[in-house]
Image (cartoon, rainbow, N blue to C red):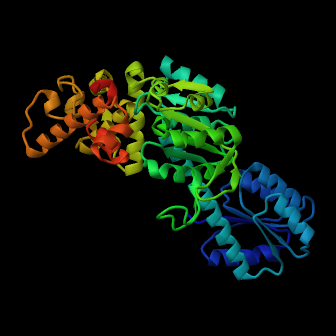
Amino acid sequence: MKPRILVIDDEAAIRDSMRMILEYEGYEFAGAATGEDGIGIVARERVDLVFLDIKMPGMDGLEALSKLKAAGDLPVVMISGHGTVATAVEATKLGAFDFIEKPLATERILLAIRNALETTRLRSENVSLRGAVELRHDIVGSSPALREVFEAVRRAAPTGATVLIRGESGVGKELVARMIHRHSLRARERFVQVNCAAIPDELIESELFGHEKGSFTGATDKQVGKFELADRGTIFLDEVGDMSLKTQAKVLRVLQEGEVERLGSSRTLKVDVRVIAATNKELEREIEKGQFREDLFFRLSVIPLSIPPLRDRAEDIPALVRHFADVFTRENNFRPKRFTPAAVQALQRARWKGNVRELRNTIERVIIMTPGDTVDVADLPEPVRPDGGGPASLPEARGERPGTLREFKESAERAFLVEKLRENDWNISRTAETIGTPRSNLYKKLEHYNIRQETDA
C-alpha cells in the first residue's frame, strides 16, 4: 500500500507542486486548502504523513498542528515562507517532526518523508515487539490461588519496597517479577535480570557490581555492573539463595546505603534500584546452616510473595495450553492446532514436577511433533498420557532396564548426582565443589535429568 501524504497549504501552486513530486516518487497525494479541511481529512481517511503550512487564513498552522497531535501520533512536517527560530521552536514543542522553509527543495522534501515514515515504522515495530514480549511474559490463569498473587502484586507494585518471591522451580517467579516492574512507577526504566545460580562464584561480584580494567586476571576492559545498569529501574535477583556470603554482604550494602563499588575501584557510586529477589529454597533453613545472612533475608522479604505450584491450580491448565499454543504458533509461523478436550484433561491430570515451565515445553514439543491440526491424547508424550506411568524421564525411573549404552550412562550419572546432593543436604555449591564441576554445569545436569529436591530427596 502506497504511503498517503496530506499537504495542507492555502496556496494552490504549492499543493500542485507537491502533488507532482509525491506522485512521481510513488506516494499517494491528498490536499487541503485550510487547517479545518485538513483536520477533517485526517479524521475521515487514512493519512501517513502531513505537510502543514504555518501561515494560513483562519486556523493557522500551529493551531492545526496542536489539534492534529491531540488526535493521534501522526508525523507532521511544518512548511513556511516566513520561518523564524521562535516559530520553529514553538512547532517542535507542539510535536512537529520537522520544519522546512520555502521555497521547497525536492531533495529536502523527500528526505523529510523518508525520515518521518521510517520513524513511524520503527515506532510501530517497537510497539509490536513490546506487545509480543508482554504476551510471552503474561501470567495466565484465574484460579483462586493465582488471584491471590495478582492482588498481592497490585498492592506491592506501586511501592518501592523490596519483594521476595518464593516458589518451586518453574512456577513463574520471573513472570511475577516482570509484572511487578510493569505496574510500578519504574515501568519506563530498565528491568535487569541476574540468575545468581548460573554465574560462577568468582564472577558474580563482577557481574553485579562491575569492575575496572586490570582489577583481576582477565579484566581487559572496564565493565558496568548490573546494579548500575538498573539505576532508576528494577533488578531481579533470581535464585538469590545461591549467592556466596561475601556477595550477600555487598548486596546488603546496596540495599542499606544505595551504593555500589566496582571491583578494583575505591570510588563509590550512588544507585537508585528497586530489588526483587526470588528463590526456590527455604531461606530460613539456609540461615540456620549459616549459608544465608539473616539481615539480608529481612531486607529482601519486606513483601514476601509465594507462587503456588501448578498442581495447586490445575484449573488454569486449559487456559495455559491455549496461551502457549498461540504464542508458539505465532512466533514460529506454525499452523494453529486444536487440543481435544480429552487431551486437555490428560494434561490437567499430569503431575507437572517442573510446573508451568514443563507444561510450556511439553506444548511446544507436541505442536512440533504432531502432524495433523488436532492434538489428541495419543499425541501427548508418554509421561503425561493417562497410561504413561508417570513423569519419569529415564528408563530406570520407569522400572525398565537401560536398553542402550547412552541410557545406562545417563541412568548412572543421575543416580550419582542424586546421591551426592543428598550427602550435601541439597546444597548446590557444596555438591558442585565435591564432585569437581562448575555450579552452572551442575544446574544444567539437574535440569536435564529433571532432578528435584521435592521428588528425589
Residue 308 in the image, given as x and y percentages of width and height: 45, 23
Residue 147 in the image, given as x and y percentages of width and height: 54, 21
Residue 166 in the image, given as x and y percentages of width and height: 49, 28
Could one spot residue 381 in this view of the protein? yes
User: In screen coordinates, is 110 left or right of 126?
Assistant: right
Going 47% across and 64% down the picture, which residue do you hit?
Answer: 218
Going 41% across and 31% down the picture, which residue do you hit?
Answer: 320
Image quadrant in which the C terminus is located: top left
Count numbered badges in the picture.
0
Residue 290 in the image, given as x and y percentages of width and height: 47, 30
User: In screen coordinates, is 418 left or right of 4?
Assistant: left
User: In screen coordinates, is 206 left or right of 446?
Assistant: right
In terms of depth relative to the viewer, which is nearer, 179 or 210?
Answer: 210
- Indicate whether 13 appears above or below 144: below
Picture quadrant of residue 350: top left
In terms of depth relative to the viewer, which is nearer, 93 or 240?
Answer: 240
